Structures are given as structure tokens and as C-alpha cells.
Amino acid sequence: MGLSKRSSVSVGNDSSMKGIAWLYYNNAYYAKVGGISRAEMNLLEVDFLFGLKFQLNVTPNAFHSYCSFLHKEMSFQSPPLERPLNLHCSFHEDESTNCLSIFGV
């Protein structure tokens, strides 16, 4: 995964975890995983949140739309994956069972 993709995933994950969890890793951790500096992570997070208009809750329809988009993007990945991934997207009204997971098959 390229640096910009890794840093984007890191920022999204960081922001989403802060929005839903009592326990989360700090920006320094996500910056290290994303291969960027903590200062850049902080700036990207602020930019990301303003881009979302600070609306971190996602409707079920938007969630399924994003899952479909991710699945389509994964199919065009270059170089192609050695083995295909099945994308399992589920969203239940019961918040305790919400999940997005990717399983290798």
C-alpha cells in the first residue's frame, strides 16, 4: 500500500476510533503505522474532520455504499493480489455487532 493510502487509512482509523471508543491509540501510534510524522498526522486529522464536517456517524446506506466502493477498488489493485480477498460488510442496528472486516480466502 502506498504512503498516501497508508496515511489516509491511519487518519480515518484514528478519527473513527476517537468517535466511538473509550480506549484508542494516540496520533503518534497511527503516524508511525502510516509512515508519517506526528505533526503531519495531526494536520491530516484536522483536515479530514473538517472535510467530514465533523460528522463521524455513518448511516447504514452510506456504509454499504462505501463497502461497495472499497470492494470495487480492491478488484483494480495493482499489482493484483496473490489471492482474492472477500469483503464481508455488515451493519446491524444493534451497535454492539457493527463490523467491517476483510477476510483472505
Image (cartoon, rainbow, N blue to C red):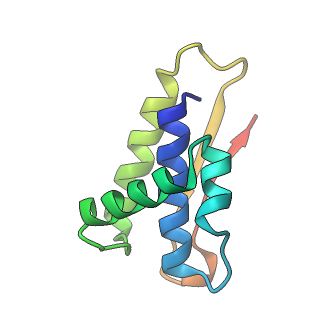
Residue at 67% from the left image edge and 47% from the top image edge: 33
Q: Is residue 59 left or right of residue 73?
A: left
Q: How many marks are shown on the rendered structure?
A: 0
Determine the residue positioned at 68% across, 59% down: 29
Q: Is residue 51 above or below residue 21?
A: above
Q: Quadrant of the N terminus?
A: top right
Asked if residue 91 lies left or right of residue 35, the reply is: left
Using the image, determine if residue 39 lies above or below residue 27.
Answer: above
Which quarter of the image is occupied by the C terminus?
top right
Q: Position of residue 99 (x, y in %)?
A: 60, 65
Along the viewing direction, whichever of 71 and 35 lies nearer the viewer: 35
Image location (x, y in percent) of residue 43: 39, 57
Q: Is residue 75 left or right of residue 53?
A: right
**Most foreground residue, 20 or 103:** 20
Residue at 71%, 44% (x, y): give it. 103
Q: Nearer the viewer, residue 98 or 38?
A: 38
Which residue of the protein is positioned furthest toward the right in this rendering? 105
**Image coordinates for residue 19, horizontal then vertical, percent:** 48, 78
Q: Position of residue 46 (x, y in %)?
A: 35, 64
Q: Residue at x 56, y 48 (%)?
A: 37
